[in-house]
Image (cartoon, rainbow, N blue to C red):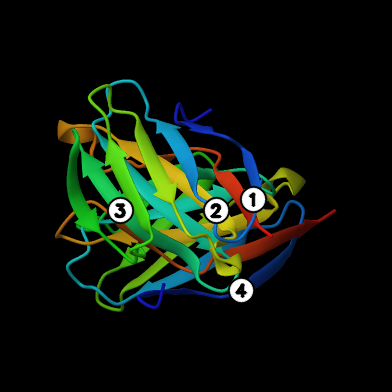
């Protein structure tokens, strides 16, 4: 989607931290999401953050939200080979429940 | 397992044909969403239903239609198929009340139009 942008590719070594970035344009977005898609599979909801929060941590995942810059990031600590996948960020606007997705970031974890 | 079931997993058909994709939402979820994923367009929202009623419409072609039945399952009908309709079609569902912020996706139907 044009409203949500992500870099295309990220390569990281196993055990390092990964940081995936996303920018969005709608300041009225209520929730922002991170989904993971493995080859041949559907979209798995990893985590989400309410727009009035700055940070959310869930085990190895940390989401940071900068509302002023409309920037969202997902940090994966101790990245494993099983984390290799495409990661999508998405925004939910104030009006309606549909999500608008970014183009996805392909993360490749090297042993 | 998200709890959202889509059938069939794969569908191969010819141009000009009509197909129906089926989705069963998670137990208790009232909203169903349809998305199309293609290489050139990414993930595009098509349509949303809530408890049997159309709630929101996205970039859905006139050749496509959907409905949600009283048992809350949904069907997406694609007609006069073209090569460009080849894509992965996802269904998602969300709950009512405090559960509406989370959308859970099925594993998709891969449509190939030859």
Q: Secondary structure at mark 1?
A: strand
Q: Residues within 10 Å of mark 4 (few under 14, many from 20)?
A: few
Query: Which residue is disc 3 drawn over?
Result: B47
Residue A37: assigned label: none
Query: Which residue is disc 1 drawn over?
Result: B13
Chain on which label 1 sits: B
Position of residue A77 measured from the top left corner of the image (x, y, whole percent): 60, 50
Q: Nearer the viewer, mark 4 or mark 3?
A: 3
**Figure quadrant of residue B94:** top left
Horizontal side of residue B57 vs A64, given as left or right: left
Q: Is residue A32 visible?
A: no
Chain on which label 3 sits: B
Between the C-alphas of marks 4 and 3, the distance is 27 Å
Residue occupying image coordinates x 30% and y 79%: A69
Query: Which residue is disc 4 drawn over?
Result: A8
Query: Which residue is disc 2 drawn over?
Result: B17
Marks 4 and 3 share the same chain: no
Query: Is there CB contact under 8 Å for labels 1 and 2?
Result: yes
Q: Nearer the viewer, mark 2 or mark 4?
A: 2
Between the C-alphas of marks 4 and 1, the distance is 31 Å
Marks 2 and 4 share the same chain: no
Position of residue B17 measured from the top left corner of the image (x, y, whole percent): 55, 53
Position of residue B53 measured from the top left corner of the image (x, y, whole percent): 16, 41
Marks 3 and 1 share the same chain: yes
């Amino acid at each position: 989607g044009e409203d949500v942008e992500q870099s295309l590719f990220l390569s990281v070594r196993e055990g390092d931290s990964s940081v995936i970035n996303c920018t969005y344009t709608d300041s009225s977005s209520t929730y922002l999401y991170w989904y993971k898609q493995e080859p041949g599979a559907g979209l798995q909801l990893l985590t989400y953050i309410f727009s009035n929060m700055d940070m959310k941590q869930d085990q190895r995942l940390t989401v940071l939200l900068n509302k002023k810059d409309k920037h969202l990031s997902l940090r994966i600590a101790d990245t494993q080979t099983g984390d290799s996948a495409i990661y999508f960020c998405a925004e939910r606007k104030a009006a309606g429940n549909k999500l608008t997705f970014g183009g996805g970031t392909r993360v490749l974890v090297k042993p | 397992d998200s709890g959202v079931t889509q059938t069939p997993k794969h569908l191969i058909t010819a141009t000009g044909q009509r197909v129906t994709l089926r989705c069963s939402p998670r137990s208790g979820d009232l909203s169903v969403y349809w998305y199309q994923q293609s290489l050139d367009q990414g993930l595009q929202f098509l349509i949303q239903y809530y408890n049997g009623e159309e709630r929101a419409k996205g970039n859905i072609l006139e050749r496509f239609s959907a409905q949600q039945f009283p048992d809350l399952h949904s069907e997406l009908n694609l007609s006069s198929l073209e090569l460009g309709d080849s894509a992965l079609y996802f269904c998602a569902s969300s709950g009512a009340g405090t559960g509406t912020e989370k959308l859970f996706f099925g594993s998709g139907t891969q449509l190939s139009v030859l």
